[in-house]
Amino acid sequence: STTSGSSTGAAQEAIPKEDIVLVASVINLTNPYMASMVEGAKALSAELDVPLKIVNSNGSSQTEISQIQAILAEGKKVVLMVNTVASSDAPPIVNAVKAAGGYVTIWWNKPDDFEPWTVGDNFVAFQKHPGVESGRCTGDALADGIGDEGNIIALPGVQDSTTSQTRVAGLEDALKDHPNVKLLEQRPANWDQQIAFKETQSLLAKYGDEIDGVWAADDAMMLGAIEAVKKAGRIDDVKFASDGLYPPTIEMMKSGMGDDAIVGETFHRGYMAAATGLYTSYLAATGELKVADMTKEQRNSLFKISCVTPENLDEFTKYDTDVEGWVKQLVENGPFDTEPATLIGQGPEKLPGS
Amino acid sequence: MSDLKARPAPDAAPAAPASASRPRPRIRGVGEVAALVVLVVVFAVLNPGTFLTLDNLRTVLDQAALPLVIGVGATLVILMGSIDLSVEGVMGAAGMTFVLLSANDRNGLDLGLGAFVVAVAVGLALGLLTGLIHTLLKVPSFIVTLGVWYVGLGIATLLFGQAAIPFLTSDGLTSWPSDTTLGLPHSFLLAFVVVALGALVSRFTRLGRYAFAIGADEQIAQDNGVPVGRYKLYVFALAGGCSALAGIVGSLQLGAGAANVGIGNLFLTIAAVVIGGTALGGGKGGVLRTALGVVLLTVLNNGLILSGVSPNIQSAVSGVVLIVAIAAAGWAYRGRLRIAK
Amino acid sequence: MSQTTTATPTSPAPTADGTPRRRARSGSWWQRLGPPAVFLALLLLIVVLQPNFFSGGGIRIVALQATPILLIALGQAIVIGVGSLDLSNAAMGLLAAILTASTLGSLGVVSPVLCVALVTLVGLVNGLVFAYTQVPSFALTLGTLGILQAASLVLSDATTVYVTANADVLAWMFNVALAGLPAAFWMAVVLAAVLWAVLRFTTVGQGMTAVGLNETGAIFSGLRTRWLKVTAFTISGFTAGLAGLTIIAQSGAASSFGLGSDLLLPGIAAAIVGGTAITGGVTNPINVVFGAATIALLPIGAAAVGVPPQAQSLVYGAVIIVAVALTMSRARGAVVK
Amino acid sequence: MTSTQQDPTRTTEAALVLDGIDKRFGQVHAVKDVSLTINRHEVLGLIGENGAGKSTLLKILTGIYQPDAGSIEVNGTQVRFRRPQDSVAAGIGVVHQEQSLLTNLSVAENLAMTASGSRRAGTRLGFYRWGRINADAAATLDRVGASIDPRTIVGDLSFVDRQMVEIARAVQVDEMVGGTPLVILDEPTSVLERNETEILEREIRTLKEIGSVVFVSHRLDEVLRICDRIAVMRHGELVAERRTDEVTEDELFQLMVGRAAQATQRDDRAGGASQTPVVAVQGLTRRGSFEDVSFEVRSGRTVAIVGTMGSGRESVCRALFGAETWDGGTIELEGTSLSAWSTVKAVKAGVAYVPSERRVEGMVGGLSAAANLTLSHPGSTRRGPFLDPRARNRTAATWFERLDVRPSDPSLPLGSFSGGNQQKVVMAKWLMAEELKVLVLDHPLRGLDPGAKEIVNEQIRAACRDGVAVVLLPDTLEEALEMGDDILVMRDGEVTGRFDLSTEAPTSLDLLEKMV
Ligand SMILES: Nc1ncnc2c1ncn2[C@@H]1O[C@H](COP(=O)(O)OP(=O)(O)OP(=O)(O)O)[C@@H](O)[C@H]1O
Ligand SMILES: Nc1ncnc2c1ncn2[C@@H]1O[C@H](COP(=O)(O)OP(=O)(O)OP(=O)(O)O)[C@@H](O)[C@H]1O
Ligand SMILES: [Mg+2]
Ligand SMILES: [Mg+2]
């Protein structure tokens, strides 16, 4: 990996710890992934002994941007981690942070050609887990789960989300190796349990017993789909695969819900993402990490995602029992080398075939 | 926000003296029924073998259940000339309350039927709050209920806290809505009962009749001795109760607590009320017409999915059908003096 | 004609019952001053709780965030003024934003002009369909909303569309500041002033007010009520188009679910907090400026004051109700629906 | 609110005693210190110019307004009517000046609405007993001789039928209280034809046997015929009380207006003033409303159309104004046949229409009187697309003075003026137009006091002198004979008689014969 290009923006000055306030901005507070992000941010705040503010975007870009701006206006030096509601939110947020002399790391969504090094030191990094990888891993698992033959349906997230689009691309790529598995239809379910429930209900009515598997771009939607399939009385015949391994999913996999209905998952954690993002910004703010010296890989980073099947489930459940412990490790090892979410490559992510 | 001009042409009365013969029956909702029939035929032709199946019928009825229940309250509110935007918030608050007080994996509470009662009470209370603010402070219902929407979501968010999704642990409970009796899902049967009660209330009780009176002209109703404020309060409370019930059923369907359990129901229900022919200006319409509107929209949605219409343009197709259906139903009544708002 | 005739006064004392002139009707001063007062009160509360609010540029942020809300709300207020509702105008703004984002690079200055024109045309069509089919505006614009959402998704290919070049054409809107507030905000304020003048000093404005107050009466006075309503919807399309441009100016990108996708309810709320009567006929665009500022202030204020994130939704709802309760004009005995 | 002992008219027979009632609306002092006694078995007439405060006083009596000062006694006990139900419970029934029925509900339900708090309630535990409600309604309607099915939706009724329902609703209070009812009738006859008025008179006499009646009307002959005693209000004050048998119509007029009545002799019957018909209606037909209607109106002449309910004359007028379509026949305006006619075109072409339903159709109550006045024909009160407020206020002031509109501030919302004064403004809105050619007047004097009637009639005549063609639907046959140059009689949508008053002199009876 190469070192970053010219750093525009003001020269990086070390900010005393007392002046710093950590800010974690999440999309909402009622999704387990987001709740986990908040948990990670809190753990880091405790570990570093730096105050923390949470921004709840409530699903709205407008709310997100205005609240972040409001906090910037308070005058403290802001160290920020944002899980953007939409990719297009990244530029205005970054610009505002830069103007206020804060440091920001963005998680999950940003425009592809909006690179940290073209903005300057204040946009420390962009971080995500690769979506294609996630889609491949759950796609493969699902295809195998239904015996390499049959029909599946897919529930992507919000239509214009790159996270969802890359995961679907991964799924489609994986299915190339399973010619007898047919993707009947995709119905976007907006990352929402309730919508996924309804869409699955409709698709079940449409395809009836033809459906052998359900793929979802994240677990909230899978949980909605599972409920719909349960109510249609087909929970023992349908397999599921999705991304995120939410706590209820763990329970279901462990208990062998249905006829071991959940066959594939990925492991990555909101608390890991939030703590990693915040810590990266924090290190830049305190000057412990010279942004100008960071590699491009470190500034537009892909972090490792792990494929989970019922067989290897136990390897991952151990992390969730000790969030503080993991955050301690993070502070010890730095943001790029803490298992299981280590830096594995540079973004932007390439779609298969392009 | 629409109504036909109330004024009759005074001299246009039939030449015969207004005799004591029964008033001519009004044929209502023909356009809507026709639209429904057309939709069913079109979808049946497009999707032979999938649309007109028992399974699909059950799906449609199950999906219609929530808007049907909400529609009863929404219709009564709209009949009064007000509007209730708080539906999704109240559903969230009541649904979350219900889940947290039933057998769930978050806490040890299990009030059984008590959970149901408390959750409905939460809805009634939010409705009552709406009504109180609306009548005492004279804030337009549009704004009060918009505010209560957020308040309801806020309550749901607070109840959700930061722990994991609360799941209902009793399978008997969660499977209740989709279990069938006489081949029909319970969720729909419940909705049916609620709609029937709603129709009876609006026809045979003071509450219902006063809603019509208030919608026709609040001032005149007041002058005629209708305690307008009090009945508005009742109706908003009732609407809150309906939303709460829908929130409970929605949570049962999901098998879990979700703050946005009501997502998408507001506009769907109001569209159904309008398509059914209840005037947004108040005073005209009815619960049964709303039920027809709900069925129409649910069939439309279901049919579009079965027909494989791309999700990207589904909202456009729904939009066009909505406009065309209402335009067609009202085409004969267009007139230069008609006020559409 | 008939100016030539003079009637014999039948009453000896025309002044006896004639009342002293009273310009201010009951409640009308509050109708005029309520919205700014509520905004200032809220601002004061926030400043007391968070003294750094001003020095940190809080007002500038409020103006920044208020701009697209204000533009949407102005169109909405005009439509509400004729007694209707436009549920599609926020979606028009988003469509304009997406179109601008995808054409700004190739067309340059022409792109925003074209996009605003196109969306204005959509507003016009909305108005025409409304006037001639007599489908209630609530239902009609709900339908249009669906169509526009689909158009946005299709035209953006369901992804985020970025401005590739010529970003400067619009960037000045928020980069140039006058008296510390962004140019776009002042532009919207000027537009509000123009609309205020139109409503107050022109026959078209008076006609729209008449339609909002009593459409039947307006028809029987020979006003071109249809065209007045079409005009209102067209204005709504136009302001929505401008709102779309401000979205691009702010973020340089647009998507169906991104910035600007949730302006509908804030827009309506801003119009009403700005003293617009939902029943029609009472619209003061100048006050809508304060309505929009109040609505924009809520989340910013909540964050500044440190309302716990879980409770923000609750606080937001409560404050909207209180704000309207304070700014509402309540003629004694008036019917509120 | 001290004792009412000083009141000389007070007897033990008093059904209702008002003492020092006072009411202001902002700056308008609508009722000033009114003390009045209404005796049992008495019909009290209440008269006064438009805006004198009659309706306001009566609304205080029925719990709609709260007085600022003063007290009310019913059957010897002091009462406070906080809500309309309170007055109903005290046995007070009312027909308001403005129709106050709920048009989306059935007749029976409207009748039951007021009764719902009382003994005769058709509801039990909040449940409606439709059978009971309908039966009760039918009985009540029978009493006033209205043959209306109680299940009819009020909106489907004609204006007159609605008025009968209102009257039925007012008189039913006696059945509710079982005691002595007080029925208040605020201009109940202004929309009624003669035969309906007779039914009402009979009903009033019946009511008098068991209770008392307060009767408001601007038709002084009627007041003298029906009432026992007459109270006169002027500018909010009670200025006189007279026994009917000791007062004449002229005296009443003097008391009301403060000066003597002028003889309304018509001296300008315009013979064959002009030869060009301004309006020519040929074989006009609208299915269900009117058929094969033909007539001409020449410049400077007035055609009065008379007919009973259902005659279709109002529909013809609305067709002239573009507010209603027609299926056959033609209307020519100054020689050009009208097609795709609309209110917009009509107003542009100089056709004016004063509708009978003033509040909804005739005006925009929320706009100022000045704005209403210049709404249709802004003329010189606008500059291009801009309003010229100063020119507008000047014009408004001129017309306010000319028509003696009170209060004299044109910047007040028109909705806050009394009915009669609203009507004057609505007339002025058309009369001010330079392009005025045809004046279609649907009951233009409805609700006007005699003074205002004179003013408005004089304005109509002046318009005629200036060459305007007038189509008039008069309140009474007398009015038709007084104002018309030609009279057209319609029945069941067809023209049944024509009289040219310059050559014939029909009597009311001649007209009546063709009407029924
Ligand atoms: N609600 C109100 N608000 C303000 N002013 C009012 C109101 N009601 C009546 N007024 C004023 O009070 C005065 C008396 O009005 P009222 O209606 O009692 O007159 P009236 O004697 O019934 O006249 P008419 O013969 O025209 O019916 C008028 O000047 C009127 O403008
Ligand atoms: N005035 C009305 N307005 C509206 N609906 C009415 C009205 N009267 C009757 N209905 C409807 O028509 C139905 C039949 O009414 P009808 O008067 O024939 O009943 P009924 O046989 O007299 O009843 P009961 O046995 O209670 O005396 C009622 O149930 C009600 O729904
Ligand atoms: Mg009166
Ligand atoms: Mg009056």
Image (cartoon, rainbow, N blue to C red):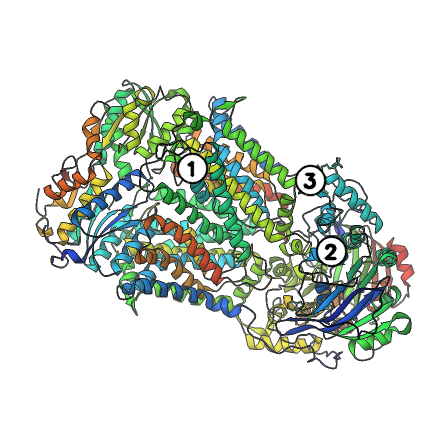
Q: Is residue D226 above or below residue C19?
A: above
Quadrant of res C301: bottom left
Q: Nearer the viewer, residue D16 or C303?
A: D16
Q: Nearer the viewer, residue B173 or A72?
A: B173
Give the Cα separation between the discs numbered 3 and 1.
Answer: 35 Å
- Residue B26's mark? 3
Disc 2 marks a residue whose amino acid type is: Val
Q: In the image, is B273 to the left or to the right of D464?
A: left
Per the image, the residue denoted by label 1 is: B314
Q: Is residue B279 above or below residue D314?
A: above
Disc 3 marks a residue whose amino acid type is: Arg
Q: Tell me the subunit letter for badge 2.
A: D
Q: Tell me the subunit letter for badge 3.
A: B
- Residue D88's mark? 2
Q: Is residue B254 above or below residue D172?
A: above
The verdict on a common chain for dots 3 and 1 is yes
Report the residue at 29% width, 68% height from top. Answer: C180
Q: Secondary structure at mark 1?
A: helix
